[in-house]
Image (cartoon, rainbow, N blue to C red):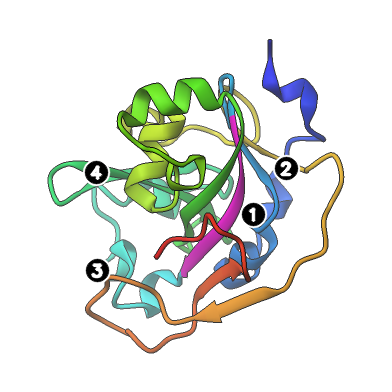
Amino acid sequence: MNSRKQYGAVLPRPFYDRPAEVVARALLGKILVHRDAAARIVETEAYLGLTDRAAHAWRGLTPRTKVLFGAPGHAYVYLIYGMYECLNLVAEGEGSPGCVLIRALEPVAGIDGMRERRGAVKRDRDLANGPGKLTIAMGVTRALNGADVTRGVLTVCEPVSQEEFEIGVSPRIGIQHNVDWPLRFFIAGNPCVSR
């Protein structure tokens, strides 16, 4: 079964062509789809590019950050701690390297495959409740770095019906610079938000 048929339209490029903070908030409640796995985005963090010392792009254009300086609506997937891959979505206009880290997801389709990829996880709410966990659960790897998320195997879709929710805001997690900037956004009360 193709899980895309269960969701609304794929988000178009103009959705991402806005300030990273705006995109980070707007992504909450949307559906991340990779092949037959799909999950609701419940937590994000905005990174503000050249003005944000916590952002990978802060030091400028490098082979690693090239995707961030490109067109909005592309995936930026990188390795942290030598073992976990993280998924970011490029925001803002070309040349302005803002991005949004996807921090946590609520699984909605392809859950058996997520369980298989994640191993001995006991509760579904723990399958994708962190940036390294969600890429494993969704089967997202660095092979998708640079993928156009407005078409292809990795996309973000509108939900069939939009639930109302309160957006929580806090400083970002696990960074060393600009630690007090309130750029982490999450669906308040959702059990799949990272701890």
Quarter of the figure with the C terminus: bottom left
Q: Residues within 10 Å of mark 3 (few under 14, many from 20)?
A: some
Residue 23's image quarter? bottom right
Marks 3 & 2, CB-CB < 8 Å contact: no
Q: In screen coordinates, is 9 left or right of 118?
A: right
Q: CA distance from mark 3 to mark 4?
A: 22 Å
Of labels 1 and 4, the one closer to you = 4
The answer to which of marks 3 and 1 sits earlier in the sequence is 1
Q: Which residue is mark 3?
A: 59
Q: Nearer the viewer, residue 121 or 18?
A: 121
Q: Which residues are magenta?
A: 38-46
| First in sequence: mark 1 vs mark 4 | 1
| Amino acid type at mark 4 | Tyr
Above or below 5: residue 170? below
- Choose top left, top right, bottom left or bottom right for residue 119: top left
- Please give left or right for residue 120 compared with residue 31 in the image: left
Relative image position of residue 54 (x, y in whole percent): 30, 73
Query: What residue is at 70 percent from the left and 54 percent from the top?
Result: 29
| Residue hosting label 1 | 16
Label disc, if present, on residue 84 of the rendered structure: 4
Q: Main secondary structure of the magenta part?
A: strand
Of labels 3 and 2, the one closer to you: 2
Helix or strand or loop: what does disc 2 sit on?
loop
Q: Secondary structure at mark 1?
A: helix
Circle 2 residues within 10 Å: few <14, some 14–19, many ≥20: some
Give the residue at x 61% y 61%.
190
Q: Nearer the viewer, mark 2 or mark 4?
A: 4
Looking at numbered disc 2 in the image, what kind of residue is underneath it?
Answer: Leu
Q: Are marks 1 and 4 in contact (CB under 8 Å)?
A: no
Mark 1: amino acid:
Tyr
Q: Which residue is mark 2?
A: 11
Q: CA distance from mark 2 to mark 1?
A: 8 Å
